[in-house]
Image (spheres, rainbow, N blue to C red):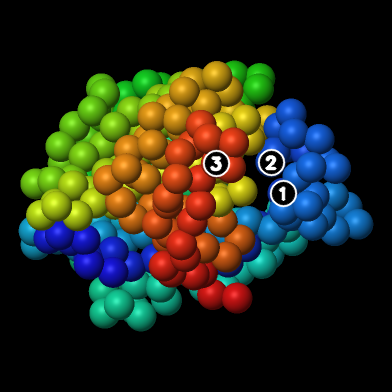
Amino acid sequence: MKIGKYFVVPLYEGRILRDGGVSFGCIPRVQWSRLAAPDENNLIPFSLGLFLVQGHGKNMLIDCGLGDKLSDEVEVQEGISRAARIDGLLETVGLDRSAIDIVVMTHLHFASAGGLTRIGEEGALEPTFPRARVVIQQGEWENGIHANLRTRGLYNKENYEALLWHQQLELIDGDLQLLPGLWVHMTGGHTEHHQIVVIDSENEGGIFFGDLVPSLWHLPLNVVSALDLMPLVTMEKKAEWLARAAHNQWVCFFSHDAQVAAAMLSGSVRAPGGLGSEVLLQHPA
């Protein structure tokens, strides 16, 4: 998909099953189950998606997925159904891991950051993308390294600590323009220093919501995952950025929607009927 000076390609690792109550927070099951029918264990599917963005001579990944370090046994325990791995995904677009110039992390939870490192031929952890600079909010890095009792089940230092020794980190503080017309904006909400990526190029736009709005199910302001550390911030920032996306007719990209990779939004986030969506790209069935 072309957006101004950029091309965006969704990449699909597979699906993960997550508890419906956790995924929809304070929304009662009788309401959310009308949207997402759970299985007998109260689990619903979410896609494991990441995005390749190409422009201005650079290949950039927005998040990098689970990676290859989990055993088959752990993947079964976590409810993961694997469709592809990063080498195969990049091969489909004519690239390899060394062709990636920039990796932007919305946050460092394992489903988004597991692919930052891999086990090398000598058995040691090494960066998956040997030439890439990895852009992370300074506060997100610190919280990922020093996880607390609530967050340590979602962070794993093996996924990113090796980047420090290989000097590939670019730790930033707040909003930053990475390339012409391509910005990161810190939102907080899901994590304290979660960030999104926005393209605003040649009167066209796109927004990569990360886990601020992981799926179309999460468009309503009160639908907030129980994993969000700052739910009121999530609601505030969702209202701000969903309104911008709808008003400006930006393409919205969703990493974890069970079916939809990209959509155009319409309507008002605060109206009784909420936002409507026109599907532009789908994840593989």
Q: Residue at x 69, y 41 (%)?
A: 23
**Mark 2 neighbour class, 10 Å CA radius: few under 14, some 14 to 19, many 20 or more:** many
Does residue 88 appear in the picture of this structure? yes
State the residue position of label 1.
18
In this view, the mark in front (1 or 2): 2
Does residue 153 appear in the picture of this structure? no
Task: Please give the label number shown on residue 199.
Answer: none
**In front here: 136 or 51?**
51
Q: Residue at x 30, y 51 (%)?
A: 249
Residues marked 1 and 2 touching at CB (< 8 Å): yes
* Residue 226 in the image: above or below residue 210: above
Residue most extreme to the front: 272
Q: Secondary structure at mark 1?
A: strand
Indicate the position of residue 218 as horizontal and vertical percent values.
58, 43
Q: Amino acid at mark 2?
A: Ser
In this view, the mark in front (3 or 2): 3
